[in-house]
Image (tube, rainbow, N blue to C red):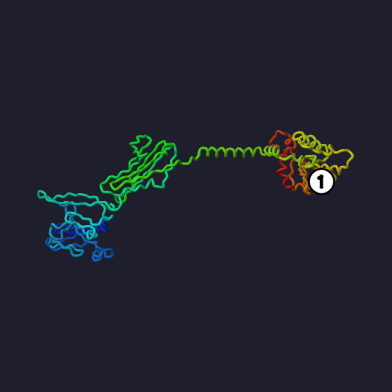
Amino acid sequence: EAVFSASLLQSSVLFVLCLCVSDIQCHDWGVWSEGSVRVYDGEVAYLYCPLFSYPTLYSYSQTQNSSLSLLWYRHTHTHELEQPINLKLHTLHKDREYLWIQPASAQDAGLYICMLRYDLFRRDRELKGDDLVIYRMMEPYTGLYTCVVSYQMNGRTLQFTRNINVIAVVPDVGSKVPIILNPASDQIYTVTLGDTVTLSCRVHLPHLYEEKQHIWWTIDNKTVEQLADPRFSALEDTLVSYDYGDELKERVLNVMDFSADDLQREFNCSARNSRGFNTSRAVLKTEPYVPTLELGCGLGVTLALMLMMFVIYHVFWLELLLLYRSWFGSDERYTDDKQYDVYISYARNSEEEEFVLSTLRRVLETEFGYSVCIFDRDSLPGGTITDDTLRFVGQSRRLVVVVSPCSAVRGTQALLELQAGLTSMLHGGSLRVVLIQFKPVRRKSWVKELRRARLALTLIRWKGEKSAPLSSRKNIKNINIFGFYFEVIYFNVMIMIY
């Protein structure tokens, strides 16, 4: 809105500008800021509508082509509401965007409002006397309409105002029978026995003027009230959507402690109005039982067992391997023609000989029951050392070589035994060689055969008194107890020399 004022003698004229661009929207441009319009009493005055002060936005010819009408209103201190200017008076005349007052008097002072609005009554609506006739109802015509009545009483002008809310509804043509959307013909409700089951019925109710339409559930052709079962309860209708008088309503049926017998019942949703009746049956089926608790417990137990087995294997892997071989492993004594399980090769001196006879032999023969061949003990007098050595090595399944500084000397029987074992192993024989370092040997002093064996075989170190106790698992895991070592090395270390 824009406002400006004029004074007639001691009075002023004030203009308020309002542009109504649609039925429901009006832009107030404020009060014109050019000041009051002053005119002498008895002279001709004209008032210019400032809405046309912006020709780039509006011009009078443009408004005529756009079906816009220029209206003038006046507001005085004697009336609370602005009054339309009666252009039928001989003193008032409208010429395009001007309002002429000829002549002006003191009674003409006040607030003047010029308004541009669409002439909406030319086609769809018409004001006939005191009645507003809408010939073609459209959505923009919905809203609040205000009627102001003025009358004279005891020489005073009185007014009263009434508001009428107008809404648009669909035409009363076509089928108006209720349409049940849920439950549909192919819809199946999945229920869980023992739970509270909720059945939803959604119905499209066409608009019927001042008519109440009904929705209800029946169980075996009985309403909830007729059934009188506290497990069954129906909620009040809920309005889901409203579309020009057409309503989408929902009615919910709750069934507590749903049982298998309830599956045999017939649940129907029905709707009725003056135009017709419709009903639809709800098809129920039980939800497949999912053993969630059992599956969770089973999975938890499985994970716990796997974790426990992993810990057991990590701690007792050696014992488990030996136990497996004792139960499921094949006995080599029945699958080959070998006579001995182990042939022990060592340097003949007091210290190594005592270790072999008192410790190594005792563990292998007494503790684990291996058949052990020791040349000095098992050879017969009268034979040659070379032939007997080769024969004993060939009749043994494993060759245990006790490595020490004395065993790596050329010309000794220990070196001959090592050469025989390596030759048998390299030529595809079934003999397997195990190296046990009894005392440290400097690498520079190793003979060629020992260096070749060290590249392909794992060297086990004897740690003296720390390796002696059989009760120590730590020693077993370090493979210092040789009876255990033979079992493990068969699967792990000696795979390199097959």
Q: Nearer the viewer, residue 317 or 86?
A: 317
Could you say where residue 139 lies in the image, as x and y percent from the top left? 28, 55
Q: Nearer the viewer, residue 303 or 213?
A: 213
Q: Quadrant of the N terminus?
A: bottom left
Which element type, helix, strand or loop, lies under badge 1?
Answer: helix
124 sits left or right of 414 in the view: left
Residue 11: which quarter of the image? bottom left
Relative height, residue 403 to residue 1 (above, below): above
325 sits left or right of 151 in the view: right
How many marks do you count on the picture? 1
Question: Could you tell me if residue 451 is visible in this image?
Answer: no
Could you say where residue 191 lies in the image, as x and y percent from the top left? 43, 41
Q: Residue furthest bottom?
A: 61
> Neighbour class for label 1 at 10 Å: few (<14), some, many (≥20)?
some
Residue at x-position 16% and y-position 63%: 93
Residue 398: which quarter of the image? top right
Q: Residue furthest left?
A: 154
51 sits left or right of 155 in the view: right
Relative height, residue 91 to residue 150 (above, below): below
The residue that disc 1 covers is 420
Amino acid type, mark 1: Ala
Question: Could you tell me if residue 158 is visible in this image?
Answer: yes
Could you say where residue 46 lies in the image, as x and y percent from the top left? 17, 63
77 sits left or right of 245 in the view: left
Q: Nearer the viewer, residue 322 or 273?
A: 273
Could you say where residue 324 lies in the image, as x and y percent from the top left? 68, 38
